[in-house]
Image: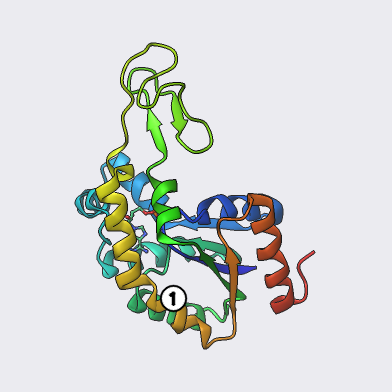
Amino acid sequence: MRIVMLGPPGAGKGTQAQILEQRFNVWQISTGDLLRMNRSEGTPLGKQASEYMDRGALVPDSLIIAMVEGALGGVDSFILDGFPRTVPQAQALDTLLEQLALPLDAVILFQAAREDLLARLTARWINPRTGRSYNTITMPPRTPGIDDDDGGPLEQRVDDQLETAKNRLDVYEAQTAALIEYYRGSGKLVEVDALAEVSVVTHAILSGVQKLMGVVS
Ligand code: AMP
């Protein structure tokens, strides 16, 4: 199985990629996770990527493409989460997969309205003293902005804050949404309602992939 997860931040691509990874034993490659790992290990790539990530901007294509080429070496089954995000990245992926004679099976497009995505992206609040995490939609604190246990203030991570979240969605619309047309022409696009329940989304992905591949059980 070779799949690309395409869609805006907050749409649940990572959640679905993890579910499919466990179910089908394929490797999930998340460029966001790889970058965060590089950043926490203080590698040269992590240092270069850091300021782009904090702004919610895209890390330059050349850095990302080299990183993905490294990650895909020796792998013939994968779920790509968060890559490609620009047309040059998609072209580089096509070239690489052509060289490896490993065509994509499907591109899953997660659809959701901007307002719903903003609500999801900004829903996470954390108690910085204990690490306890809340979700203002699914698991809110008793008093907004206040921790249930110690009564102190809750905080948001920088990239969950409203302005950064808006910026990440703007970047998606400006640079990544063009990939929808890029892939539509290939006949491999599977469109799913990203706001449906997690298990419903998984089912929609699998039946779409099954139609294209005819072999997934
Ligand atoms: P994510 O966890 O996928 O939202 O990625 C977090 C951040 O990593 C993004 O806001 C970008 O700064 C960077 N990033 C991840 N994947 C890519 C990519 N394919 N191209 C450029 N930047 C990326």
Q: x%, y% of residue 102? A: 57, 77
Q: Is residue 126 left or right of residue 52?
A: right
Q: How is the image coloured?
A: rainbow
Relative vertical location of residue 141 with respect to residue 7 in this rendering, above or below: above
Considering the image in quadrants, where does the C terminus appear? bottom right
Residue at x 41%, y 69% (from the top left corner): 84
| Rendering coords of residue 87 (x, y %) | 36, 78
* Quadrant of image for the N terminus: bottom right
- Give the quadrant of residue 208: bottom right
Could you tell me residue 105's position as x and y percent? 62, 75
Tag 1's secondary structure? helix
> Outermost residue toward the right?
217
- What residue lies at 54% left-to-right and 56% top-to-bottom? 28
User: Which picture quadrant has residue 205?
Assistant: bottom right
Local crowd size for mark 1, using a 10 Å CA cut-off: few (<14), some (14–19), many (≥20): some
Return the x and y of residue 166 as percentages of the image width and height: 29, 55
Of all residues, the one furthest to the top in this rendering is: 150
Kindly indicate the quadrant of the structure image that contains residue 182: bottom left
Query: Which amino acid type is shown beneath numbered disc 1?
Result: Leu
In front of the other: 159 or 83:
159
| Residue wearing tag 1 | 93
In the rendered image of this protein, does residue 21 appear above or below residue 212? Answer: above
As drawn, which residue projects farthest toward the bottom? 185
Q: Is residue 42 left or right of residue 21?
A: left
Q: Locate ligand 1 by image quadrant.
A: bottom left
Q: Nearer the viewer, residue 157 or 18?
A: 157
